[in-house]
Amino acid sequence: MLYVNETVFLADWELSESFVRSTGPGGQNVNKVSTAVELRFEAERSPHLTPQAKARLKRLAGRRWTNEGAIVIQADETRSQARNRELARERLVDLVAQALIVPKRRVATKPTYGSVQRRLVAKKVRGAVKAGRAAPDDED
């Protein structure tokens, strides 16, 4: 079981891990030991997430979201399989935690009368400065 916060957790049946050979550091060991971790989370089937959270999770996951509605996270930074496993789980928890945050609705506001007036005065002043730079007209 993987805890995201006090109220949300991911059950073991929702997660599956596979270990593959890693690229990167490890020397000759890279060719012998499967240290990279591929963590798969069945997000679409998860009963612990609301439909709104699933939609946000899909948007946040991007390319990691599969056609079957799962999220695939890969970790191969370290030479240790156990550490890569921890890293993958931490990334998944962070991603799900971000998706659980409900964004604030933006309240549309109108600019104040004073701010509109200040903006118009500033535009007039700026226009006058630019007009002063123009070449003088020949009136002969």
Image (cartoon, helix red, strand yellow):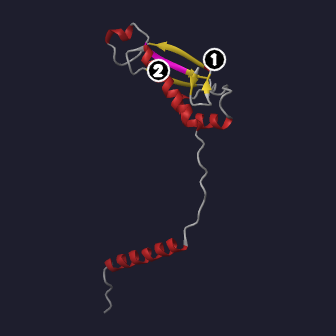
Given residues 131 and 95, the one toward you in this image is 95
**Residue furthest bottom as drawn:** 140
Q: Residue at x 55, y 34 (%)?
A: 97
> Quarter holding the C terminus?
bottom left
The residue depicted at 61 percent of the width and 26 percent of the height is: 9
Relative to 60, is 29 above or below?
A: above
Q: Which residues are magenta?
A: 35-39
Q: Is residue 139 left or right of residue 74?
A: left
Q: Main secondary structure of the magenta part?
A: strand
Q: Position of residue 35 (x, y in %)?
A: 43, 13
Find residue 13 and name its label. Answer: 1
Q: Residue at x 39, y 17 (%)?
A: 23
Secondary element at tag 2: helix
Q: Is residue 58 magenta?
A: no
Expressed as whole percent of the image width and height from the top left, the position of residue 92 reads 53, 27
- Figure quadrant of the N terminus: top right
Picture coordinates of residue 108, whole percent (x, y)? 60, 59
Residue furthest to the front in view is 6
Mark 2, Cα crowd under 10 Å, few <14 / some 14-19 / many 20+, is few
Which residue type does callout 1 highlight? Trp
Q: Amino acid at mark 2?
A: Glu
Q: Earlier in the sequence, mark 2 or mark 1?
A: 1
Residue 89 lies left or right of residue 53; in this view the side is: left
List x then y, in percent, for residue 72.
54, 24
Judge the density around disc 1: few (<14), some (14-19), many (≥20) Cα neighbours within 10 Å.
Answer: few
Quadrant of residue 29 within the rendered picture: top left
7 on left or right of 83: right
Which mark, by number, is residue 86?
Answer: 2
Label drawn at residue 78: none
